[in-house]
Amino acid sequence: MTVLPDNFDPLRGPAALAVGTAGRVRVGGLRAGELTEWRLVTSPATGMPTLIGRGTFARYYAQALGSQAEAEVTPSPAPHYIGRKKPPTPRPFRLRGTIAEISATTIVLSHGTLARG
């Protein structure tokens, strides 16, 4: 039996650690596509970072399922509320992980490791 964390919603999936609207995906050092919408979550099964994204990807990368890929993403700024201090602007980061799912419009990178810059 799998024990799910407290922040898991079965209708929407795990809570997002970061979200954004810009990014680039590379497979084997070659540009595979552009992200137009993405969210970074912690997998409830493995506890590792997982990137779920939408965008445009080259169709021939469908054969790369199970191989290593790297996503360079820029998080969206956190919302600013009147009367509160403005939150710091998030810095871009990279996620290197295994391609769990890829199509012409979606990608899922699982078992990821994070790096700044």
Image (cartoon, helix red, strand yellow):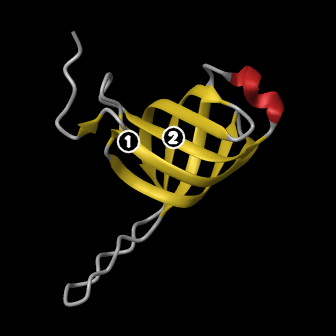
Crowding around mark 1 (Cα neighbors within 10 Å: few <14, some 14 to 19, many 20+) is many
In-image side of 41 versus 82 (left or right): right
- Residue under the point 46% across and 66% down: 76
Residue, x 19% and y 20% (percent of image)? 3
- Residue at the image point whose x is 54% and y is 55% from the top: 73
| Quarter occupied by residue 116 | bottom left
Amino acid beneath label 2: Ile
Position in image of residue 45 (x %, y %): 32, 22
Q: Amino acid at mark 1?
A: Val
Q: Are marks 1 and 2 in contact (CB under 8 Å)?
A: yes
Q: Residues within 10 Å of mark 2 (few under 14, many from 20)?
A: some
Please provide percent x and percent y for residue 24: 65, 51
Figure check: 81 above or below 13: below
User: Would you identify the image quadrant in which residue 21 lies?
Assistant: bottom right
Disc on res. 114: none
Q: Which residue is mark 1?
A: 41
x then y, percent, for residue 50? 43, 36
What residue is shown at x 29% (from left), y 76% (from top)? 87
Point out the image quarter for the N terminus: top left
Q: Which residue bears the numbered disc 2?
A: 52
Mark 1 vs mark 2: which is more N-terminal? 1
Residue 104 sits above or below residue 77 on the image: above
Say above or below: 46 vs 93.
above
The CA distance from mark 1 to mark 2 is 8 Å
Q: Residue furthest top?
A: 1
